[in-house]
């Protein structure tokens, strides 16, 4: 069985080494990478590494209810006796699942619309797509998400749909700007002169030159998507009990502040560290790609 290194050419291996060296020279990027890897590890393996995996669902043990942080329960327990640290680990799973699913929907759709509008710049296609995009961008994101979720039954799926409807215009606008600037380059004009199909030009000639900014925005957006999803859960329009969504845990714990402060503080810190980790990682990737483009 061949190793990954043996599948890469010498130039590719050298390029990876240079990129890693550039990335690793920024200590904050390394902190972000470690944070993201740690959170992802806990999310994937939470059923096996959580100290009390039964705490993720409908588990009640009043003999352990409302215990403060201790060696047995590092983050304390909630009013039902469920271990908060275990629920935070499972909460990472739901929040990351939400971010991945939302970005998997909005990035392709928004990028495609931006590509089409940018390629047909100045035509009615450009006008229709970008005016619809402007309408969505004119409405505050959180207000639109709250309005959509209020019309639907509160659930994780419906909150994902709501955030998806408000997030695609940002990728449409980014892809439109990039495509409009690349549209008149010589290699695009050459492809048109030889009779290449517009779809071929958009996806094989223009799109590869737009991937770096789009990928950077994706990394930075993970934290914002998690924040919006946590906000919806906090106001009761996202994931519902007993699902251990971090925003919902903060909302439930806030009812018992300040006596049982740990029910709110630790889930809130988990959200903050998740957002901080992805933002630091995104900044590192952005700086790396900016250097490569120069």
Image (cartoon, rainbow, N blue to C red):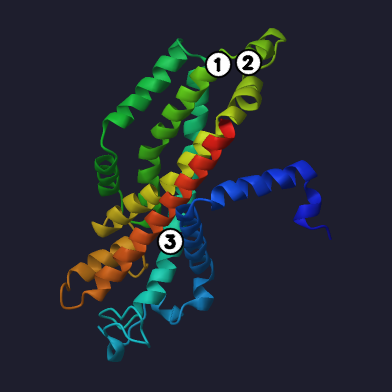
Among the two numbered marks 2 and 1 on one chain, the one whose residue lies closer to the N terminus: 1
Reply above or below: 17 against 191.
Answer: below
User: Where the N terminus falls, by quadrant?
Assistant: bottom right
Mark 1 Cα within 10 Å, few/some/many (few <14, many 20+)? many
Residue 126: assigned label: none
Direction left: furthest residue: 258
Residue 188: assigned label: 2
Element under disc 3: helix
Point out the frontmost of discs 3 and 2: 2
Direction bottom: furthest residue: 63
Asked whether disc 2 touches disc 1, contact meaning CB atoms under 8 Å apart, the reply is yes
What residue do we see at 32% from left, 56% from top? 230
Mark 3 Cα within 10 Å, few/some/many (few <14, many 20+)? many
Horizontal and vertical percent position of residue 135: 31, 26
Horizontal and vertical percent position of residue 153: 31, 53
Tell how many labels: 3
> Could you say which is closer to the camera, residue 31 or residue 84?
31
What residue do we see at 30% from left, 88% from top? 64
Does residue 124 appear to the left or right of 134 in the view shown? Answer: right
Reply above or below: 33 against 70.
Answer: above
What residue do we see at 45% from left, 23% from top? 177
Reply above or below: 185 against 212.
Answer: above
> How far, Cα to Cα, is label 3 from label 2?
42 Å
Residue placed under numbered mark 1 in the picture = 183
Residue placed under numbered mark 3 in the picture = 94
Horizontal and vertical percent position of residue 74: 36, 81
């Amino acid at each position: 069985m061949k190793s990954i290194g043996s599948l890469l050419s010498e130039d590719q291996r050298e390029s990876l080494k240079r990129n890693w060296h550039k990335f690793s020279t920024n200590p904050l990027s390394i902190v972000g990478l470690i944070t993201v890897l740690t959170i992802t590890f806990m999310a994937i393996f939470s059923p096996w590494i959580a100290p009390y995996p039964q705490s993720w669902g409908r588990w009640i043990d009043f003999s352990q209810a409302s215990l403060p942080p201790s060696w047995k329960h590092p983050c304390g327990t909630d009013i039902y006796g469920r271990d908060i640290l275990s629920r935070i680990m499972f909460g990472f799973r739901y929040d990351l699942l939400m971010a991945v699913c939302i970005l998997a929907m909005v990035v392709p759709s928004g990028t495609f619309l931006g590509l089409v509008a940018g390629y047909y710049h100045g035509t009615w296609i450009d006008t229709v797509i970008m005016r619809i995009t402007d309408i969505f961008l004119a409405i505050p994101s959180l207000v639109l998400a709250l309005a959509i979720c209020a019309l639907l039954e509160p659930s994780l799926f419906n909150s994902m749909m709501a955030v998806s409807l408000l997030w695609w215009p940002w990728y449409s606008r980014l892809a439109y700007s990039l495509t409009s600037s690349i549209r008149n380059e010589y290699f695009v004009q050459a492809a048109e002169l030889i009779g290449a199909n517009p779809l071929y030009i958009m996806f094989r000639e223009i799109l590869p030159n737009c991937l770096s900014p789009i990928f950077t925005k994706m990394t930075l957006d993970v934290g914002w998507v998690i924040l919006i999803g946590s906000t919806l859960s906090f106001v009761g329009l996202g994931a519902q009990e007993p699902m251990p969504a971090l925003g919902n845990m903060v909302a439930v714990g806030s009812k018992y502040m300040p006596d049982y402060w740990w029910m709110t503080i630790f889930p809130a810190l988990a959200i903050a560290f998740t957002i901080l980790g992805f933002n630091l990682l995104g900044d590192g990737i952005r700086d790396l790609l900016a250097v490569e483009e120069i």
